[in-house]
Amino acid sequence: MTRSRRRAPRRSFGAIRKLPSGRYQARYPGAGGILRAAPQTYETKRDAEVFLAQIQADQARGDWIDPMAGEVLFAEYAKRWIDERGIAPTTEELYRRLLRLHLEPTFGEQHVNTISPAKVRTWRAERLKATGDTTTAKSYRLLKAIMQTAVEDELIRRNPCSIRGAGREDADERPVATVDQVLALAEAIGIRWRLMVLLGAFASMRPEELAELRRADIDLDAGSVWVRRAAPELNTGRRVIGDPKSRAGKREIALPSFVLLDVRRHLEWFAKDGPDGLVFVGERGAALRGTTFGRKWRKARDAVGMPKCFRFYDLRHTGNTLAADTGAKLKDLMVRAGQSSERAQLIYQHSTKEHQRRLADDIDATVRSQRTSADRGSGTSATATVHRIVPPLAAPAGAARRR
C-alpha cells in the first residue's frame, strides 16, 4: 500500500517562490490586494518567511507604508505643499526662493521615499560651505516641514531630517542706535521722510506698517497711532496689502509727546487728502516704494556715519530696547511692538555693559533705601546701616599683614 504524499499547507499571507538562480522571492499583498515583490531576494526560504511575517505584522498594526506611495518627485510634492499652506505672500515668496535655489538642485528629481538621513546630512554640509548658517537653517526648516507632511501623508515612515539644532539660526545681535543718532538720521533723510524715522524708532513700527498707514489711523487728540494694515513689498515690487505680521500686530501705539509736532506737520504738508489717504507717499504722490526709500535711507545713514549693516528695520530694535529700558512689563512691551510671543520680544531687549551697570546701581539704591528706612525707625546711624548691608570683614586668623 503506497502512502500518499502530503501537500504543504497553503500560505495564508503572501507567496514565496524559488527562482532559477536558487534564491527565494517573497511577494506580499499591497494596496488593492495586488501581490508585490520584496525589494530583494533571499538566500533561504526561512529568510523570505521572516520578511513576510514582518510585513504582515506592520499591516496588522497599521504601521505599513506602501513603498510605491512615496514614488513622487520631491519638486512636485514641495510645490504642492507650498500651494496648500495658505501662508502670507512674503512667506510664500521666501519658501519658493529657498526651494528653487537650495532644495531643488539636490532633491528636485529624487523621489520623496529615497531621501535618506545620509543625503540630508551631505546636502546640509554642502550648503553651509556655499551659503552660510542662516540661509542653510531656513532651508533645512523648510525641508523638514515638507518631509514631516510626507510622513503624515503616509508616503514615508519617518522624517529623514533629524539633525539636532540644524534649523536654529544663531544670527548676530542687531545694532542699536542712540537717541542722538536717531535724531541725526531723521534730520539727514529730509523733511518728507523724517517722520518715518521717528515712528520707526520711537513707536517701534515695522516698515510695512508705515507703508500702509492712513490719515484715519492717527488720533492727534489721544496722541496715538493705530496699526490696522500692512503692505509688505515683494521682491517683484508688488505691494501686498493685508493684515499685520501677527494677530497682535493690530494695535494702538501711544506716541511720545515730542513726536506729535512732526506728526501734525507731516499730515499738513505731505499726506494724501481724505481720511483714507496714505500718510507716506513719494514726491509724485504714489505709494511708498522700498527701492526709492532705500536709496534715501542709505544716503542718510552714510551722512550720519552709521555702519552700513544698520538697516531701517534696526530702528525698531532701537525703539524696543528704549522701551525695555523704561522698566515696562513684558506684556506691555509685547503689545506696543505688536508681538504675540515672549520669545519675539526678548530678541529686541539688548543687554549692554551700560544697561547692566544701571541695573546694578538700581539694585544697590533699592537695597540701601529699604535698609535705611527700616533702620531710621530704630535710630540706627547711617554708618551702621551700610555695615548691616555689607558687614566689614575681619582678617582670617593667622593671615600675614601686608606691608
Image (cartoon, grey):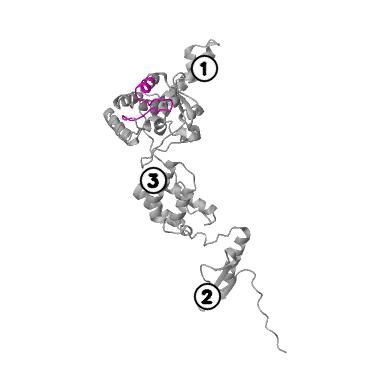
Camera-side mark, 2 or 1: 2
Query: Residue 213, how many percent across, how many down?
Result: 42, 29
What label does residue 23 carry, if any? 2
Marks 2/3: CA–CA distance: 49 Å
Residue 273 lies in the magenta-colored region: yes
Q: In this picture, is 399 found above or below 381?
A: below
Q: Circle 1 sits in a helix, a strand or a loop, which is it?
A: helix
Asked if residue 185 shows in the view, the reply is yes
Q: Which residues are magenta?
A: 264-284
Say which of 364 and 115 sits in front: 115
Marks 3/1: CA–CA distance: 51 Å
Query: Residue 358, how many percent across, how many down?
Result: 42, 23
Identity, as a three-letter code, of the amino acid under mark 1: Gln
Say which of 125 and 398 sits in front: 125
Assess whether mark 1 and mark 3 are in contact (beta carbons under 8 angstroms): no
Q: Which residue is mark 1?
A: 370
Say which of 126 and 392 sits in front: 126
Q: Farthest residue to the top: give it.
A: 379
Q: In this picture, is 169 found above or below 360?
A: below
Camera-side mark, 2 or 3: 3
Chain-order first, disc 2 or disc 1: 2
Chain-order first, disc 2 or disc 3: 2
Marks 2/1: CA–CA distance: 88 Å
Asked if residue 393 shows in the view, the reply is no
Identity, as a three-letter code, of the amino acid under mark 3: Thr
At 44% from the left and 57% from the top, the residue drawn is 118
Q: Circle 2 sits in a helix, a strand or a loop, which is it?
A: loop
What secondary structure characterizes most of the magenta part? loop
Q: Farthest residue to the left: give it.
A: 303
Identity, as a three-letter code, of the amino acid under mark 2: Arg
